[in-house]
Image (cartoon, grey):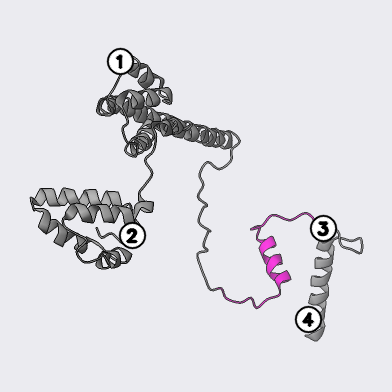
Amino acid sequence: MRYDGTQDPLEHLMAFEARMNLEGVGDEVRCRAFPVTLAGPAIRWFNGLPQGSIYGFSDISRAFLAQFTTRIAKAKHPINLLGITQRPGESTRKYLDRFNDECLEIDGLTDSVASLCLTNDLLNKDFRKHLTTKPVWTMHEIQTVAKEYINDEEVSQVMAANKRHSGYNQPRQQGNGKRHKEQAKEGGPTKAHRPFPRIGKFTNYTPLTLPIVEVYQQIAERGILSKPRPLKDRTGGTRASTVTTTRAMDTKHKTALT
């Protein structure tokens, strides 16, 4: 990580010293390695240091923190924990994550203050009751105990969600079954599919050479069709008499021509 003057200089300095301690290097190597971790305005500041003003890494550390002192994050007070409360509907897991993140930003936080603030704001009654059995808990102990209550809480949430889902589907299934029974009782269709359209035996038919009246008369004489009920014509007579008269006139006309 390179420091460009926009981050917390104290955090960068602590990370650098931790890396140097891990490597086991001396003061001279620290002085030569520190500029490599700078960039932008920070490296320009380092290059502008007066010649002969640095005798050891401690001089670099003091000058570095003084130059970028406005970037040092202000330490939070334990009273800030009072503002970290569990929101309605928030799971215990998410609440503990937010609480732990806030604890890491507070210098000098004691276990007694942390456990007291956490206990007062817990919505899980069983977990809160368990924490009252001991006056002081470390955050490590709280995390260990919290696993059991978090697991129980998440299992209960899953079961409740499944119950709501099954309760939503059951009325729909019952309604569909009732509708099918009513259709079967009334003689209506019980299946959703439609029957295939009927297809005739032939697709091509020979055109008629006789008038439709004569064709019908021949069929009627053979008794293939039942005699239809006479329908009244607009003139007051019946269509059957009109057809008979028409056929008689047609026969007379053919005889006269012969």
In this rendering, the answer to whether 25 lies above or below 160 is below
Q: CA distance from mark 1 to mark 3?
A: 104 Å
Question: Position of 114 compared to 243: left or right?
Answer: left
Label 2 CA crowd tier, 10 Å (few <14, some 14–19, many 20+): some
Chain part drawn in magenta: 205-230
Tell me which numbered mark, 2 or 3, is placed earlier along the sequence: 2
Identify the mark nearer the N-term, 2 or 4.
2
Residues under labels 1 and 4: Cα distance? 125 Å
**Amino acid, disc 2:** Gly
Query: Picture coordinates of residue 197 (x, y %)?
Result: 53, 58
Number of residues whose C-alpha sits closer than 10 Å to that of mark 1, classed few (under 14), some (14–19) or many (20 or more): few
- Which numbered mark, 1 or 4, is in the foreground of this view? 1
Is disc 3 placed on a helix, strand or loop? loop
Which label is found at residue 5?
Answer: 2
Position of 249 with respect to 228 (left or right) is: right
Q: Are marks 3 and 4 in contact (CB under 8 Å)?
A: no
Task: Quarter of the image for the C terminus: give it.
Answer: bottom right
Of discs 2 and 3, which sits in the foreground?
A: 2
Depth order, front residue of 112/119: 112
Q: Nearer the viewer, mark 2 or mark 4?
A: 2
Q: Is residue 74 above or below residue 136?
A: below
| Between discs 3 and 4, the one toward the N terminus | 3
Q: Which residue appears at 37% of the width and 34% of the height?
A: 99
Are there few (<14), some (14-19), or many (20+) residues within 10 Å of tag 4? few
Q: Secondary structure at mark 1?
A: loop
The quarter holding residue 48 reads bottom left
Lower sequence index among marks 1 and 4: 1
- The residue beneath circle 3 is 231
Disc number placed over residue 254 in the picture, else none: 4
Quick one: SS at disc 4?
helix
| Three-letter amino acid code of the residue under disc 4 | Lys
